[in-house]
Image (spheres, grey):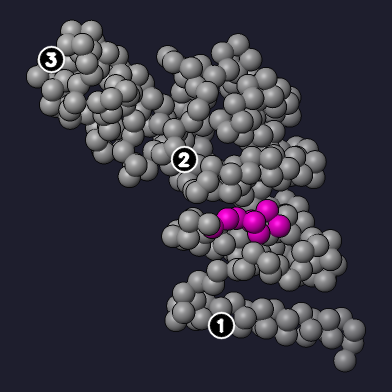
């Protein structure tokens, strides 16, 4: 048997074993539920070691590691354990993108998983930036990576100068759309202004390449709507206090005074919470729009 035929047979055998392993894992998950990786166990921690071991099957292994990263993130997000964490998320994503340095979805979605605040995400914007910088270093023709870094700085870190700088870097990559330069200019001039944030997320929504990104942009716009509504409702309660010497004790009381219409609902359809002591207004603890971003100035 020639060496070429031997390599072909070996490749087919390994591919068959991988397919069998995946099939068995799917069957196991159906019977017992998806596994929850222990934080102390990531058997191969070195991306370079994994890359050397993968030989010519690095693409297949990258797909498998990406699936495990998504399962890990989803399992942690849905867990009821109050002490849950996402300690293995970045190592899984690091290995995935080392096995396949052009794995665009792993960089961009992985950065969102990492940057989302706890408990919905890992609460590690620093790691999200590390992952995206790695992607840009290995794929300098992809304007999306510095663009996403700008968003992490803007939305999660509230570092508007750094956001403007990265949007500008993105705009300088050949092939970047014209509106990226506009985002750099607006961020530099009005960073933290709620109107500017709305414009950035509206652009994100209109240019999203996937349903998940569109849904994320829609949720961010709803959060901004909620913040505007909370400002208006707080103002109404202060008007009530100026007339009656105290804050309203219920929405019905504010409605009877002609300051609101009925019981105000947030953009997700849940009623706002009114604090009769401080006069403050907040989202219901059950609202999916929690937590609202901090540091955003008014309209």
Residue 151 belongs to the span the image colors magenta: no
Quadrant (top left, top right, bottom left, bottom right) of the C terminus: top left
Q: For the residue carrying disc 1, how many other residues have a C-alpha within 10 Å: few (<14), some (14-19), or many (20+)?
A: few
Image point 66% across, 83% down: which residue? Answer: 16
Q: Is residue 176 left or right of residue 201?
A: right
Residue named by callout 1: 24
Residue named by callout 3: 258
Q: Dot 1: what SS?
A: helix
Residue named by callout 2: 216
Mark 3 / mark 2, whichever is N-terminal: 2
Mark 1–mark 3 Cα distance, whole angstroms, equals 64 Å
Mark 2–mark 1 Cα distance, whole angstroms, equals 33 Å
Mark 2 / mark 1, whichever is N-terminal: 1
Q: Is residue 181 left or right of residue 253?
A: right
Q: Nearer the viewer, residue 16 or 25?
A: 25
Image point 58% across, 49% down: which residue? Answer: 122
Residue 120's place in the image compared with 69, above or below, is above
- The circle drawn on residue 37 is none
Q: How many numbered badges does the structure rendering display?
A: 3
Q: Dot 2: what SS?
A: helix
Q: Main secondary structure of the magenta part?
A: loop
């Amino acid at each position: 048997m020639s060496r070429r035929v031997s390599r072909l047979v070996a490749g087919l055998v390994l591919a068959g074993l991988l397919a069998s392993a995946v099939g068995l894992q799917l069957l196991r998950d159906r019977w017992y539920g998806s596994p929850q990786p222990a934080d102390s166990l990531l058997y191969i921690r070195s991306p370079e070691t994994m890359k050397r071991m993968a030989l010519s099957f690095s693409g297949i292994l990258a797909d498998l590691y990406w699936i495990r990263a998504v399962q890990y993130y989803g399992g942690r997000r849905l867990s009821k354990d109050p002490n849950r964490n996402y300690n293995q998320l970045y190592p899984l994503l690091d290995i995935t993108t080392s096995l396949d340095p052009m794995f665009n979805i792993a960089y961009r979605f992985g950065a969102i998983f990492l940057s989302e605040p706890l408990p919905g995400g890992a609460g590690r914007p620093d790691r999200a930036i590390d992952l995206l910088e790695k992607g840009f270093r290995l794929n300098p023709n992809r304007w999306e990576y510095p663009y996403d870094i700008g968003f992490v700085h803007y939305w999660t870190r509230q570092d508007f100068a750094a956001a403007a700088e990265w949007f500008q870097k993105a705009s300088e990559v050949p092939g970047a759309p014209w509106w990226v330069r506009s985002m750099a200019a607006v961020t530099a001039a009005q960073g933290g202004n709620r109107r500017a944030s709305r414009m950035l997320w509206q652009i994100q929504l209109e240019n999203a390449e996937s349903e998940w990104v569109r849904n994320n942009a829609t949720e961010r716009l709803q959060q901004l709507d909620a913040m505007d509504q909370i400002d208006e409702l707080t103002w109404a309660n202060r008007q009530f206090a100026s007339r009656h010497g105290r804050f309203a004790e219920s929405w019905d009381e504010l409605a009877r005074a002609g300051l609101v219409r009925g019981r105000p609902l947030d953009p997700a359809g849940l009623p706002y919470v009114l604090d009769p002591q401080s006069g403050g207004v907040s989202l219901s603890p059950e609202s999916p729009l929690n937590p609202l971003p901090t540091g955003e100035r008014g309209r």
